[in-house]
Amino acid sequence: MINNNNELGWNLEISYAQLPEKFYATLELNPVKSPELVYFNEELAKNLGLDSEKLNSEAAVEVFAGNRMPKGSIPLAQAYGGHQFGHFNMLGDGRALLVGEQLTSSGECLDIQLKGSGRTPFSRGGDGRAALGPMLREYIISEAMYGLGIPTTRSLAVVSTGESIIRETELPGAILTRVAASHIRVGTFQYAARWGTIDDLQALADYTIKRHFPEIEEKEDRYLLLLREVINRQAALIAKWQLVGFIHGVMNTDNMTISGETIDYGPCAFMNSYDPATVFSSIDRQGRYAYGNQPPIGGWNLTRFAESLLPLLHEDQDEAVDLAQAEISKYMDLYNDYWLQGMRAKLGLFNEEKEDSSLIKELLEMMEQYSADFTNTFKALTLRQYNGSNLFNTTAFSDWSRKWEERLEKQQKTSEASQELMRNNNPAVIPRNHRVEEALAAAVEDGDYDVMKRLLNALSNPFEYAAEQEEYASLPPKSAKPYRTFCGT
């Protein structure tokens, strides 16, 4: 169903409603009393074909608040399951509403979803609402990830609701408008495999292929190719996370998209001092989703995806398992290839040599030993400005630096080209956790969004190496308490 209306530029398709009804629930709206637009992504709005000038209007704010829908929209909540910290549960959109899929002039089909829009049949006793702070956090981090060139959902708008919600304390309510290639998750396939028929599973797989992998739609082995494509995208995505020190914090299977985008910025954060055991999430007490565990957890989640696809891979169960295992076995090699390629770029290396892995490993081991900042270490290497870390004063680093320079001389590229490669792969700034908290406090407690605006401006082009970004590259003051994040989104 396509709605080609010109109201604010909406051009919606509701293709998800073509799936069997078990995959979603249609919703009644849960209006809020006094919505107010507090942050708006004008650049994204233009890319979506929306009229950015009119999106500040009362009519637009009513849509962002979930008080009314654009013409032709069928508000849906999607059903899915998922392994949460290793335990499988029935889930679904407990506080989200799919407005529809926006068709852009460039041919993209992008989900428009409201997060925090009220109760759904999948709310499981929750109020379906969200707090202002976590919605602004998702806005900041998702847009920072976009600036870093990492596949991600994006944030179009945040509205305050004029209502309070009760968590540990009373908090101001808010709704985020999220834009995604789709919200189809590994958990969506798990849900279909466990509670649907083979026909339901096939309908979901065919819909997913048509939407995300149309080049394989006519292939006889398209379901095996679907598995292969998803494995490849996730290997590439998680490698990108590792290369900038991003820690997702809650890599449950319902938080892994089939499209290969990063989704659900709850207890996420960026690592300062390099340590593979780094965990920020307050609920991850065992370190399941620590920085160093993210690659293998990606493989674990993909194995669950493969299990869900088994009935489509081959009519013989044993043959289906063999096919799935053959594809899953390629994941870590794919991940390692993407990661090694990225690490070479961070060190200015265009070609491949046998000693690259040991050179990289030695650097990371030194960084861990001397608690060197992940981002600033690579920034220092890029600029050849060795200050700000005890690491640079050691004999070990001097020895490593000599080996690195000798390795650089083995390639045909100039030193200027090598440095340019490094500048394009080593961000000068990331969303430092203390800067994010500073912006959130100013917005939520004081109604001051200028701090957030300046932060987002600095993060919009993290590879610029501009003078005005320097203040955002500084490390936080030392604290006796470890930094902790919470599942507030």
Image (cartoon, rainbow, N blue to C red):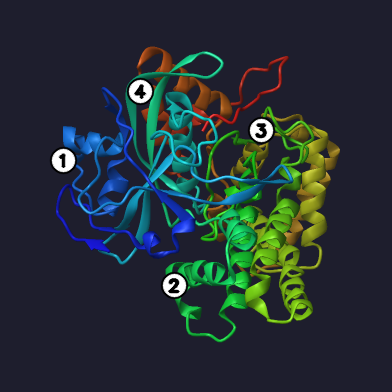
Instruction: Mark 1 or mark 3: name the one nearer the start of the chain.
Output: 1
Residue 449 image label = 4
Q: Quadrant of residue 268?
A: top right
Q: Which residue is mark 1?
A: 54
Which callout, 1 or 2, points at the residue further toward the start of the chain?
1
Disc 3 vs disc 2: Cβ atoms closer than 8 Å? Answer: no
Task: Quote the CA–CA distance across marks 1 and 3.
Answer: 41 Å
Residue annotated with mark 2: 210
Please state which of the two labelled residues, at mark 3 or mark 2, is closer to the viewer. 2
Sequence-first tag of 1 and 4: 1
Instruction: Measuring from the top left, give residue 10's x and y in whole percent.
Output: 22, 52
The image quadrant that residue 332 belongs to is bottom right
Q: Nearer the viewer, residue 326 or 17?
A: 17
Q: Secondary structure at mark 1?
A: helix
Comes first in the chain, label 3 or label 4: 3
User: Marks 4/2: CA distance?
Assistant: 41 Å
Rounded to the nearest angstrom, the CA distance separating label 1 from label 4 is 21 Å
